[in-house]
Amino acid sequence: MDKTTVLKRLYGQSLSFIKERPLITAILSGIIAGLLLIIIHVSNIFSYLSDRPETCMNCHIMGTQYATWMHSAHREVTNCNDCHVPQDNIIKKYMFKAMDGLRHSYVFTLRAEPQAIIIKKQGERAVSDNCKRCHESLFLSPALKNENLYNVSASEGRLCWHCHRETPHGLLRSLSSNPYARVPTTDSMIPTWLDDIMKKEQTKNLNKKMK
């Protein structure tokens, strides 16, 4: 039995199930839609369409990176995406953000993040290209022209941060290297209407205890 036949059979069975059990179908559809809405709300998914650095703080493990960027000179001229996301093409930019975001979500949800975050090959290429894009005039120097700075894919030559090691995130980059840094926090996942009800209940209970 080929794949086309199997798919046609599954499609036919699905249609017959929907026709025969519309109530169950409606309930299941509502549950799935509700779960999707909760995921969208909890993950703050629309914030990832922006370039705001605070968006990176949706994952609590990025506190060190945010704090070190905030105390660097790069804060005045760049945000996270300016360095870490391709800027040469809008489609490439959002494809990169989507793929990177899915990987980050997977790692963060499973609590599989390393103690010291190390940039991946794709990230190296993006950061290297953006270094050269912003500091293009510096690459006119004959001294730099003699250096092999460009072959990121083959891991040959020097990358910009092989010399500029502290730019902009410093030398200590583990999850616990800046434990007292003041960084933005994510908003509460509890909806406002539910939070108001809970506060009213707490106030009532407190008043009862005081009487």
Image: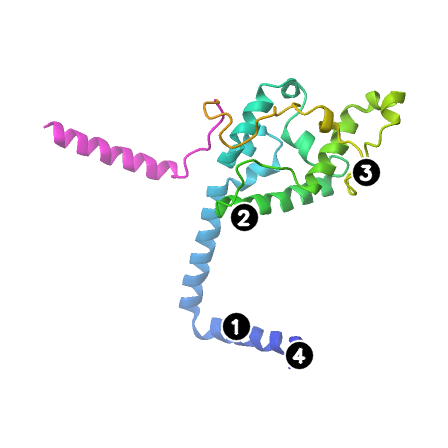
Q: Are marks 3 and 2 in contact (CB under 8 Å)?
A: no
Q: Residue at x 44, y 52 (%)?
A: 34
Distance of label 1 from label 4 (alpha carbons): 19 Å
Classify mark 2: helix, strand or loop. Answer: helix
Which mark is on residue 207?
none
Classify mark 1: helix, strand or loop. Answer: helix
Q: Nearer the viewer, mark 1 or mark 3?
A: 3
Q: Nearer the viewer, mark 4 or mark 2?
A: 2
Q: Residue at x 78, y 31 (%)?
A: 158
N-term-proximal mark, 1 vs 4? 4
Magenta stretch containing residue 167, yes or no? no
Q: Are marks 1 and 3 in contact (CB under 8 Å)?
A: no
Residue at mark 1: 14
Q: Residue at x 28, y 33 (%)?
A: 199
Residue at mark 3: 151
The image position of residue 50, as x and y in percent, is: 61, 34
N-term-proximal mark, 3 vs 4? 4
Distance of label 1 from label 3 (alpha carbons): 52 Å
Q: Nearer the viewer, mark 1 or mark 4?
A: 4
Which amino acid type corresponds to the residue marked 2 in the rendered image?
Tyr
Residue at mark 2: 106
In the foreground, 138 or 21: 138
N-term-proximal mark, 4 vs 2? 4
Distance of label 4 from label 2 (alpha carbons): 33 Å
Distance of label 1 from label 2 (alpha carbons): 30 Å
In the foreground, 126 or 81: 126
N-term-proximal mark, 3 vs 2? 2
Which mark is on residue 2?
4
Q: Main secondary structure of the magenta part?
A: helix
Q: Are marks 1 and 4 in contact (CB under 8 Å)?
A: no
Distance of label 3 from label 4 (alpha carbons): 45 Å
